[in-house]
Amino acid sequence: MGLGVGIFLIAVGAVLAFAIHYSTAGGVDLHTVGWILMAVGGLGTLLRGAARATSAAASRVA
């Protein structure tokens, strides 16, 4: 997952979690889906940054 995808997931998740005021009679809670998307986007962004930092450090050593 690239940085852009992670930021996009965070933004879409924030819209679903905070800006949508829609109650569904079905089993899908949009607020929960929003929080999950924000968590996945944040985790992906952090892991991408850690992988980039690790690869940059490895290329300097070798």
Image (cartoon, rainbow, N blue to C red):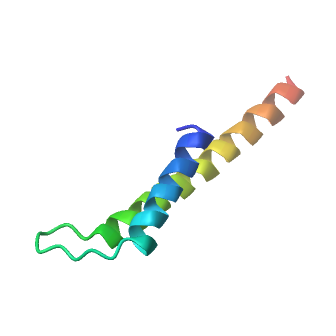
**Residue 3 placement (x, y as % from top left):** 62, 42
Going 14% across and 69% down the picture, which residue do you hit? 27
Q: Going by the image, does 21 lie left or right of 43?
A: left
**Residue 43 placement (x, y as % from top left):** 54, 55
**Residue 8 placement (x, y as % from top left):** 52, 49
Going 67% across and 40% down the picture, which residue do you hit? 51
- Residue placed most toward the observer, 51 or 20: 20
Looking at the image, how many numbered discs can be counted on the residues? 0
For the C terminus, the image quarter is top right
Q: Residue furthest top?
A: 62
* Residue 2 found in image quarter: top right
- Residue placed most toward the observer, 54 or 41: 41
- Residue placed most toward the observer, 10 or 42: 10
Going 80% across and 33% down the picture, which residue do you hit? 56
Q: Residue furthest left?
A: 26
Q: Residue 30, relative to residue 4: is it above or below?
A: below
**Residue 28 placement (x, y as % from top left):** 20, 66
Q: Going by the image, does 15 lie left or right of 58?
A: left
- Residue placed most toward the observer, 43 or 6: 6
Q: Going by the image, does 55 lie left or right of 39?
A: right
Q: Going by the image, does 51 lie left or right of 2?
A: right
Q: Residue 52, relative to residue 10: is it above or below?
A: above
Going 44% across and 61% down the picture, which residue do you hit? 13
Q: Residue furthest right?
A: 60
Q: Residue 52, relative to residue 9: is it above or below?
A: above
